[in-house]
Amino acid sequence: MLCEAREFADRAATLFWRRVGKEKSTPKSRANRIVRAADGARVSLNVLLSGATGESAPMLRDYFSALIFSRTPAGCNLCIEELLRIALADSHFSFVRSGKETREHHSIDLSWLWTSVHILGWYHVFKTLVRKTFYTAVEGLVWSICSNKYDTPMLGTLDRWKHLVVLPWLQGIQAPDYPVFEKRDFGRFGVESLSHLVNLVADENYVSARVREFYDIIADFPDSTCAVLELRETLFRTRQHHLVAQALRVMLQRRLLHSGANTAQIIDMYIATIKVLRLLDPRDIFLSAVTFPVRKYLQHRKDTVRCIVANLTDEISGELYQELHQSMTSSQRFEESDAFHANRPRDDWIPQSSKSRYATAHAMGDVLFMLISIYGTKELFVNEYRCMLAEK
């Protein structure tokens, strides 16, 4: 009896790969063939186990699986990975076209395949492919949704996308007894909290997408204020401030601190960087660390002082001129408020971080102060201003 069962399993395994086929075809055709082959394997397994008793049933199941996967042709895993990726991308593009959930028939439906896979006990074979596809696909799709969109709120769109595209895709793959991500893969969260995993991975990739474009976001500020505020909100959940700080520091060194950029451009970008970081991180924890290379570079530019003074005295287009008057107004208000609240500390007061180089309330957010402090003294700027007046 056992010999006959093994012969039947051998024929069924041969039939499985015959149904899958080797010829090239469209992804939809390949998906249909694989679904039919898996469904046929499930029927064959039922027949195989119908006459099995006792300990022979698990042995026959394992034997049948081993026969099939020992004959796996080259490129089969790549084919499954491609189908997973296309199924997710298909749902993604339907969402992008409509902006909401669609009821149209998708070109590739793999739900029946995963039902068969779980019944056959094959999910462990494809688990790594599912995880790989999930992480790489989410990275690319988040980028396609959010890239180059700085003045438009994107987190709401991303939230709908997570719940209408990614989460259903994962739920279609998993089964109650066969989780896509086990509890140990995601800390204290279990299968019931797949949405937490999707939220975290999407948020982390949103931060990565914004970091890749951070130089352009700074260059477009204040038009890119929306992107900065949403990045601040996302960083509050992911705690990836160190990633942003390290990436921006390297980015500024590579794209700004070179001989091809004139000093006025570097100063403008430095001012915008301070403003963006002030908005992104009001406590200025990594402001000095990010901008230190720029400050050091400006120290060695011969025309830095002249460019700063020129910007400071330009009433028409000088950003520093406007910043000076805003700073003076803010300073006056601060002194009045400070005198009023001298003996009345607020309940929500937070001490200043010891990591920041700029410890006073005036200096911390003051762009002008940060420019002057590059040289540590105001005398250079006063002398340069006198020289410019004498030249006039």
Image: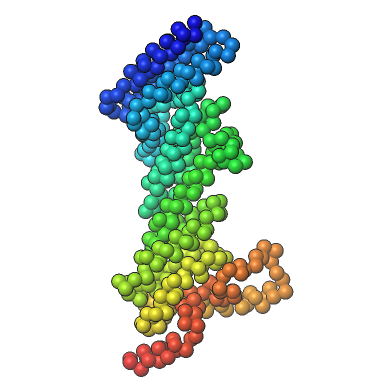
| Quadrant of the snapshot with the C terminus | bottom left
Residue depicted at x 37% and y 91%: 387
Furthest-left residue in this view = 24
Can residue 48 be seen here? The reply is: yes
Residue 391 image offset from top left, x and y in percent:
33, 92
Q: Total of numbered circles in the picture?
A: 0
**Colour convention of the picture:** rainbow
Left or right of 319: which side holds 193?
right
Furthest-bottom residue in this view = 390
Above or below — where is 171 with respect to 42? below
Can residue 43 be seen here? The reply is: no
Residue depicted at x 42% and y 52%: 209
Report which quarter residue 340 is drawn in: bottom right
Above or below — where is 78 with respect to 51? below
Left or right of 51: which side holds 32?
left
Residue 69 image offset from top left, x and y in percent:
42, 24
Residue 4 image offset from top left, x and y in percent:
45, 7
Residue 324 image offset from top left, x and y in percent:
47, 78
Report which quarter residue 71 is drawn in: top left
Furthest-front residue in this view = 3
In the image shown, does 164 or 138 lie closer to the viewer?
138
Residue depicted at x 36% and y 83%: 302
Residue depicted at x 45% and y 30%: 126
Above or below — where is 197 with respect to 351? above
In the image shown, does 343 or 315 lie closer to the viewer?
343
